[in-house]
Image: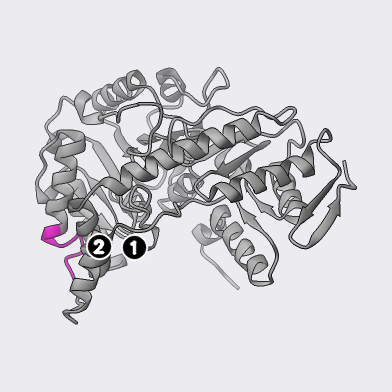
Amino acid sequence: MSLSLIAQSIEGSPTLGLNKKFAILKAKGEPVIHLGGGEPKSKVPMAAINATIEHLNTREIRYTPADGIPPLKEAIIGYTEKFYERKVDPKNVCASGGAKQAIMVALQAVVNPGDEIVYPAPYWVSYPDMAKLCGAKGVAAYPEYGTFYPELKDITDKVNSKTKLIIINSPNNPTGVMYSEEFIADLVKFCSEKEIYLIMDDIYHRLIFDGRTQINPYKYEKENIECSKLIVINGVSKQYAMTGFRLGWAIANKDVIGAMARIQGHQTSGPSVLSQKGAIGALDGDQTSVETLRSELELKRNMMMDMLNSFEGVKVTIPDGTFYCFADFSFYDEDSNRLSELLIDKAKVLTVPGTGFGLDGHLRISYCGSEEDITEGINRMKWALDLNSPEEIKIGDQKLVRDWV
């Protein structure tokens, strides 16, 4: 069978593939624990549910404008003014089928084949393949000093005449680190001076810990939005636990947004009207659920850090936000795919290998599940890997003995 060159170059999403494997094991009755999750387990805000039901009951479920219905744009404009202190117009807003589609369509709107897209490593698994889908080249920028916190020079060293766009995800998936305000400020100024597009993937920007405050990139953008190459991405999936609604958005100058609307019109005709109505409910409704989720995640992060620090040889950077940590397990195995397979096969615990994020020897472990799953899952991992732990463990109805090194 003959497939396109793009199709042949694209890898399947490792996180979605692992979710599928977990579902199969779960369906078989295996006592598996998911520590690779990318979605909160809290309930969707009732305001979002009620808004969706109210529109569903009209039985008028129709097409919408490709870039979003006016009431949703107004809700996004209000959100942008509140959290970014920037007043924008409806022509500066494009709603999409999730923040992932918003990023993809933004790239298609501004990137040409042969261009280069730079992003700090470790990076979200989809960035390299998104670049390929545009015929562009993804370029990972690794911090010089081996931390997860890049400096401006780490990024600018990768910039050349082919660089069209830089993507920043902070707080970061997979590491959970929040880049410094100085770094963001310097990068916004650099991109403005060099006329390079800058995507701020801010999907986790309200899920931050230890009293940190959100960093506003517009604070350092001197240009009027119509002259700016800054593109801010956000959505309802993470902060409102509305992953299944698939609703995200982009804020940018009217030319970029217009191009995004045209492209999206041919791809999907825009996001579902029901998702848009639900997002309006979430954005305009009571915000208590966001703070509740944030505080719960901070407590679970602390629990996971205490447990991981009890391992011999595991190195972990304390996450500043999100619901992930990216722990260095190379003491046990530098091949993170092999290590992840061992943990799911022997301990029935799903983790995500670091290779997909650009750094082998690491595992992405999520603390967005229940406290019981975190405790049981980490205990199983320790049993499977740490020779200082007891050789026997009970998993489900089975008593298992660690018979490997």
Q: Decide which of 210, 176 is in the foreground and name it.
A: 210
Quadrant housing residue 34: bottom right
Can you tell which mark lies on residue 245?
A: 1
Point out the stretch of residues depicted in magenta: 64-71
Task: Classify mark 1: helix, strand or loop.
Answer: helix
Can you tell which mark lies on residue 67?
A: none
Q: Are marks 2 and 1 in contact (CB under 8 Å)?
A: yes
What amino acid is labelled 1 in the image? Phe
Tell me which label, 2 or 1, sits earlier in the chain. 1
What amino acid is labelled 2 in the image? Gly
Based on the picture, tell me whether residue 66 belongs to the magenta stretch. yes
Question: Distance from label 2 to label 1 (Cα)?
Answer: 8 Å
Based on the picture, tell me whether residue 360 belongs to the magenta stretch. no
User: Residue extending furthest bottom?
Assistant: 59
For label 2, the residue is 278
- Alpha-carbon neighbours of circle 2 within 10 Å: few (<14), some, or many (≥20)? many
